[in-house]
Amino acid sequence: MAETREGAIPIQRVPSWGRAVRVARAARSGGLARLAGVRPHLVLALAFLAGYCLLALVRYQRFGSPSWDLGIFTEAVKGYAHLRAPVVSIKGPGFNALGDHWSPILALLAPAFWLVPSAATLLVAQAALFAWSVGVVSDTAARVLGGSTSRGLLIGTAYGLSWGLQRAIDAEFHEIAFAVPLLALVCRQILLGNWERAAWWAMPLVLVKEDLGLTAAAVGVVLMVRGRRWYTGSVLLVFGAVFAALTVLLLIPHFNPNHQFDYWSKLPGGEHPHLWQVVRGAFTRLTVWKTVGWLLGIVGFLALRSPLMLLALPTLAWRFGSANPMFWGSDWHYNATLMPILFLALVDGIDRIRRAEHSVLKGFAEGMVPAAPGIAVACMVSLPVGLGGLADPSAWSGGAHGAALRAAIAQIPPNVRVESSMAPLARLAARDDAYWLGGSKQQAPDFLCVDLAGWSGGPTDLPGYGAALHPGSTYKVVFDRDQVVVLQRQ
């Protein structure tokens, strides 16, 4: 304020036009500098987005689904997109997906499904979420390791190539796709010392899957141990643990047709497991130790130097303590959520070793950065993940059998009740009320879509097969080509 005589109206000084221009130019220059620093990591993320989309969509195009999961998630997202409950007919008439796993975060895909109502939308969404995490890991590594863009890109490339992400892409869409970038952002904020931001990014994990509430609780422990944020950490610890218990004991049973959490049966001893059986199983299975070797080996075991590894313990505990062998190994999508934790723990471990006054691991830690992409590629070769056969033209379309499947799907009108075998299931789920073969006992379906390829001992009398599945109904063949048959109810 300018000095004035008593009683005079004060005059407020304003910056000169030249000063305002200089301030604007400085702000613009700073923004451009930040953008220039982020650009290489954004380009890396876009490159992986293209690669992930290629792998996922080629498999989708050739009808190479390894399970019915893509169809299940397509039905759930379709329900949200139509502002209805996420009913998954594939698992049974009227089955609510929230009675299987607690994944309401899938509703975020509804707008994309409005635009492109296809199972391929989910595959592209997962590719985008994974690619986002690649950019986060790459930029975080560059910041922590001395602002070196090249180091960040090397770590980001190794992470993007990691076998855990590749296995998940190969297994098609799963809800954990949302957890991957969330965990990358949580670890990033912890490494940068943004403790409250880390807590905020951890909280949505409870909407991805029921077990991830325990991971959110583990974030609270890390905030207390590393960040000395006792209040924030303790609140997050309680929030995550209570929400995990709430989903398993109340929310999922509420939506489940049998009013229970079905996965208690996956523990040794069923619904009343003996703690010793769980612990003994986790430490005495060879497959478990092999998986641990693959997980730690891809980061040169240096991730063990970081407290971020605490975040991996809840996932490892429920998987290795399970009685289901599918959870123990390196297959499927179960290791994807561990990849951002491992690689940012690697970054933290390298940084800690570099800053230590005396450490025999300094040379090894420095060499790990350029070696990381090579190790990731070596793991991909040892655990083949969906890259083989892309040079074969039939891999892109499915050949004559793929053409027959597309023609069969075209024979089935939208918005009808249809039972299907594995290959065409996801595509039909995007537009029809789709069931697994024999799954619609209460009401006979309008169509059956049967893929006999690779079905050893499959039925030869298809109308008789349809009548056996649904007594009292008769079916006639309306399409039959290259072992793909469509039957319509009369």
Image (tube, rainbow, N blue to C red):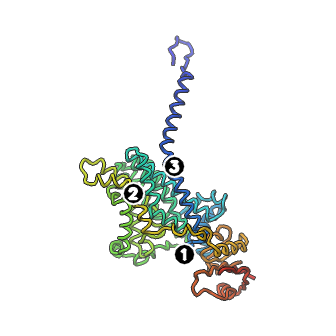
| Amino acid beneath label 1 | Asn
Q: Where is residue 230? Give x, y as percent.
A: 36, 50
| Amino acid beneath label 3 | Leu
Marking on residue 209: none
Residue drawn at point x = 34 percent, y = 49 percent: 351
Using the image as rendered, state which of residue 380 and residue 390 is in the foreground.
390
Of pointers 3 and 1, the one earlier in the residue sequence:
3
Q: Where is residue 184? Give x, y as percent.
A: 45, 54
| Amino acid beneath label 2 | Ala
Residue drawn at point x = 43 percent, y = 75 percent: 325
On the rendered structure, is 90 left or right of 236?
Answer: right
On the rendered structure, is 234 left or right of 243?
Answer: left
Using the image as rendered, state which of residue 160 and residue 465 is in the foreground.
160
Q: Nearer the viewer, mark 1 or mark 2?
A: 2
Residue that carries the numbered disc 1 in the rendered image? 258
C-alpha separation, residue under disc 1 versus residue under disc 2 = 48 Å
Q: Secondary structure at mark 1?
A: loop
Q: Secondary structure at mark 2?
A: helix
Q: Report if residue 217 is visible in the image.
A: no
Q: Nearer the viewer, mark 3 or mark 1?
A: 3
Residue 314, placed above or below residue 439? above
**Disc 3, disc 2: CB below 8 Å?**
no
C-alpha separation, residue under disc 3 versus residue under disc 1 = 46 Å
**Disc 3, disc 1: CB below 8 Å?**
no
C-alpha separation, residue under disc 3 versus residue under disc 2 = 20 Å
Residue that carries the numbered disc 3 in the rendered image? 42
Of pointers 3 and 2, the one earlier in the residue sequence:
3
Q: Report if residue 40 is visible in the image.
A: yes
Residue that carries the numbered disc 2 in the rendered image? 372
Q: Where is residue 137? Give x, y as percent.
A: 45, 52
Label 2 crowd (10 A; few <14 / some 14-19 / many >=20): many
Indicate the quadrant where residue 415 lies.
bottom right
